[in-house]
Image (spheres, rainbow, N blue to C red):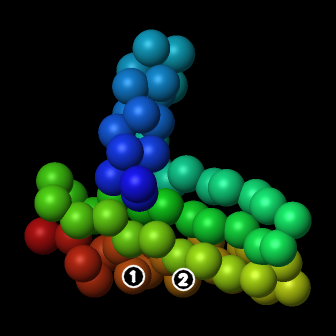
Amino acid sequence: MSATMLSLSERIGHELARGVIDRIFVDGEKGFGVLVGCGADAVLLVLASSHAKQGYCFWKSSGLFLNFSP
């Protein structure tokens, strides 16, 4: 499902002329998720509770992305 969300967001970004999508943020009642593409074959999904700091999760997921991308 994560790969489908990332593919759909890339199409939306292209259609809206917003360039390459860096990450997808999904906010819900029980928490949130950050989805980051890591190259052509990998997706990083970070799930956090509603008590987690969103900025910190964004920052850490960007650092992890740099470690995983080729």
Residue 8: x %, y % from top left: 42, 34
Q: Label 2: how many residues lie within 10 Å, few (<14), some (14-19) or many (20+)?
A: few
Q: Nearer the viewer, residue 21 or 47?
A: 47
Instruction: Decide if residue 63 is on the left or right side of residue 41.
Output: right
Residue 59 visible (yes or no):
no
Q: Is residue 27 above or below residue 70?
A: above
Residue 23 visible (yes or no):
yes
Instruction: Decide if residue 46 is on the left or right side of residue 15.
Output: right
Q: Is residue 52 above or below residue 18?
A: below
Instruction: Decide if residue 1 is on the left or right side of residue 55.
Output: left
| Residue under pointer 2 | 60
Q: Nearer the viewer, residue 38 or 30?
A: 30
Residue 24: x %, y % from top left: 55, 51
| Residue under pointer 1 | 64
Q: Nearer the viewer, residue 5 or 25?
A: 5
Residue drawn at 60 percent across, 77 percent down: 47
Alpha carbons under labels 2 and 1: distance apart: 6 Å
Q: Label 1: how many residues lie within 10 Å, few (<14), some (14-19) or many (20+)?
A: some
SS under mark 2: helix
The N terminus - image quarter: bottom left
Amino acid type of the residue that numbered disc 1 sits on in the rendered structure = Leu
Residue 13 is marked as none
Residue drawn at 33 percent across, 52 percent down: 3
Amino acid type of the residue that numbered disc 2 sits on in the rendered structure = Lys
Rendering quarter of residue 38: bottom left
